[in-house]
Image (tube, rainbow, N blue to C red):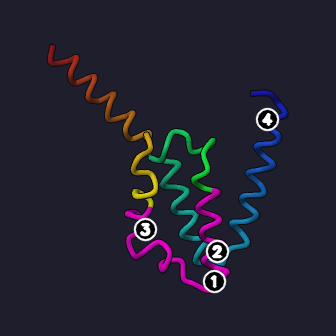
């Protein structure tokens, strides 16, 4: 990754953050909580993927239509998040595999 890639990535991220800040307050809160969740346990390709920009577009469309954010996600936002990444490899998966490998090695 060259310096140009880093600069372009920062520009894209700043534009993304500006779009988030343009959402209604309730959408911003839910989006930021989802983002935090994904940064902790989310897919390992989160930075390269289209998950967050796609979610942001979904929220922008919902806000433009005058819908409440929980109308889009449902009352159980965690279940909504998990459904979006159900087929993705996550950091939690990697951790679980390492724990399983260590316990398997210890038994031998």
Q: Are marks 1 and 2 in contact (CB under 8 Å)?
A: yes
Which residue is painted at 63% across and 83% down in the image? 65
* First reached walking from the N terminus: tag 1 or tag 3: 1
Which residue is painted at 40% across and 63% down in the image? 78
Per the model, the C-alpha gap separating discs 1 and 2 is: 6 Å
**Residue 51 located left or right of residue 93:** right
Tell me, for residue 5, which label it has, or none.
Answer: 4
* First reached walking from the N terminus: tag 1 or tag 4: 4
Residue 10: quarter of image: top right
Tell me, for residue 52, which label it has, or none.
Answer: none
Disc 3 crowd, CA 10 A, few/some/many (<14, 14-19, 20+): some
Which residue is painted at 58% across and 63% down in the image? 32
Q: Position of residue 60 (x, y in %)?
A: 66, 72
Mark 1 element type: loop
Which residue is painted at 79% across and 35% down in the image? 5
Image vertical order of residue 101 relative to residue 87, above or below: above
Mark 3 element type: helix
Q: Dot 3 corresponds to which residue? A: 77
Tell me, for residue 65, which label it has, or none.
Answer: 1
Assign the C terminus to one quadrant of the image: top left
């Amino acid at each position: 990754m060259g310096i140009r890639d880093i600069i372009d990535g920062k520009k894209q991220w700043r534009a993304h953050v500006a779009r988030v800040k343009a959402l209604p307050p309730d959408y911003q809160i839910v989006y930021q909580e989802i983002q935090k969740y994904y940064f902790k346990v989310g897919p390992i390709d989160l930075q390269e993927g289209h998950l967050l920009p796609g979610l942001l577009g979904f929220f922008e469309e919902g806000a433009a239509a005058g819908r409440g954010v929980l109308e889009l996600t449902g009352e159980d936002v965690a279940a909504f998040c998990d459904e979006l990444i159900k087929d993705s490899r996550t950091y939690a998966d990697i951790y679980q595999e390492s724990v399983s490998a260590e316990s398997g090695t210890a038994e031998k």
